[in-house]
Amino acid sequence: MLNNMNLEYKEKIKKFNEITKNKLNKSYKTMEDFINSENYYRYIHEDKIFNDEELQFFNELNLLEIYKYLAVEQVKSYEDINILETVEKDIKAYGLSGKAKEIAKKRYEILDKRFKQIKEDGDYKSLFFLGSPYRTYSLLFQDILSECIYEIMILVVLITSYLINYEFDNKTSLLVYSTKRGRNNDRDKLAVCLLSSFIISLIILGVTLLAYFITFDYSNILNIPLNSAFNWENIMPIINIFGHTFINQLMLSILIVIVCMLIFTAITFVISKLLKNSYIVFFIFLIIFGINLSVSTFVSKSSPIIMHLGYDVFNLAIRPGSWFTSKIPFIANKYYELITIVVWGCMCMLSLMFVIKRFKKEDIN
């Protein structure tokens, strides 16, 4: 790959110097020399010596040059990473001690084995958008998906609470639920709420992602592993536990968003059947959401309990950028997303069965 890149670069730098020689009577050793030259701004923006096609060529050459010089350095830096060297520093940063610290060390050992496997597989040598300057992974999988999740969640909670408590909010509950069909409408309402949640999720995700991919072209990296050394944004690179390609990660992330929204719908349904006021339901849901996110702050950093928190759908939903990636030291199980969804899905199903059965015998006077 590097050999081909070098050959392409030599051809393009030759063409570049032909253009500059013709229009400026100058030649440059590298594209960087041209960009750093004293009159660069005047050539490009004031005098507009070069046409759009030439400027586009310059941009492509500049990008090729960046990758050409960074490729070896980036890969070498990735190979030199030692996960276990950061253990003490990370544990100290999180403030862990006692049994929690011991658990954390074991989890770093698990991650170290996985990281060595990535190096052996060679996935990290695949070309990807440069993480440090562009941060495309965080932009898409954390920033944009998070915004979508919050938008969908608010709509889902409002719609579900409104539909379930429509009769109570409009003072028609005694009339409706006194009929033969009245109390059996709950299952139909639940089906409508789940379907609405699914449709809303598809619309918001579809429109948002369509706009994103119209703006940014990912067509050439759909099957590139996310464990690429170029996809490195922070102090530690992104370590995808399963070695997903970009398209794999995107499809699975969309699936998780939809499933989480269905679970939120079920939770809202349960709260609505217990409280019977759509306005109160919304705020109670937000309170439950906040409690689940903040519970770890009330647990001692030396207790092993803190190392097992996070297996809840609320914590899962707000961190789409960490799905299927290392969440050391607090989460080490590679099937964290699946376990969380299955457990909360089962809990919701049991809760739904309970409130529906309970409502049939409940006094609504």
Image: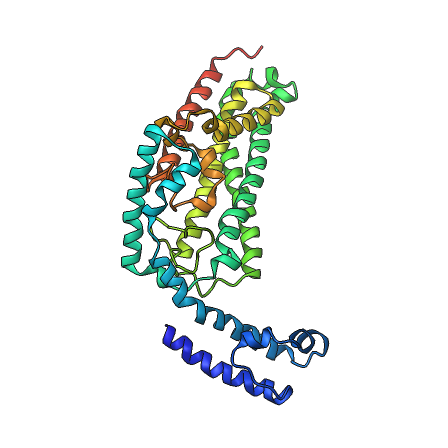
- Residue drawn where x is 56% and y is 28% of the image: 286
The quadrant where residue 305 appears: top left
Seen from this angle, which residue lies furthest right? 46
Residue 182 lies left or right of residue 99; in this view the side is: right
Q: Is residue 63 above or below residue 205?
A: below
- Residue drawn where x is 49% and y is 49% of the image: 141
Counting from the top left corner in percent of width and height, residue 105 is at 31, 38
- Using the image as rendered, state which of residue 287 and residue 26 is in the foreground: 26
Counting from the top left corner in percent of width and height, residue 314 is at 47, 33
Numbered label tally: 0
Q: Is residue 140 above or below residue 266?
A: below
Q: Quadrant of the N terminus?
A: bottom left
The quadrant where residue 50 appears: bottom right
- Residue drawn where x is 56% and y is 12% of the image: 364
Q: Is residue 328 visible?
A: no
Counting from the top left corner in percent of width and height, residue 33 is at 56, 76
Counting from the top left corner in percent of width and height, residue 107 is at 31, 39
Q: Is residue 264 above or below residue 357?
A: below
- Using the image as rendered, state which of residue 360 and residue 47 is in the foreground: 47
Q: Quadrant of the C terminus?
A: top right
Coloring scheme of the render? rainbow
Q: Is residue 126 above or below residue 264?
A: below
Q: Is residue 215 visible?
A: yes
Residue 228 lies left or right of residue 18; in this view the side is: left
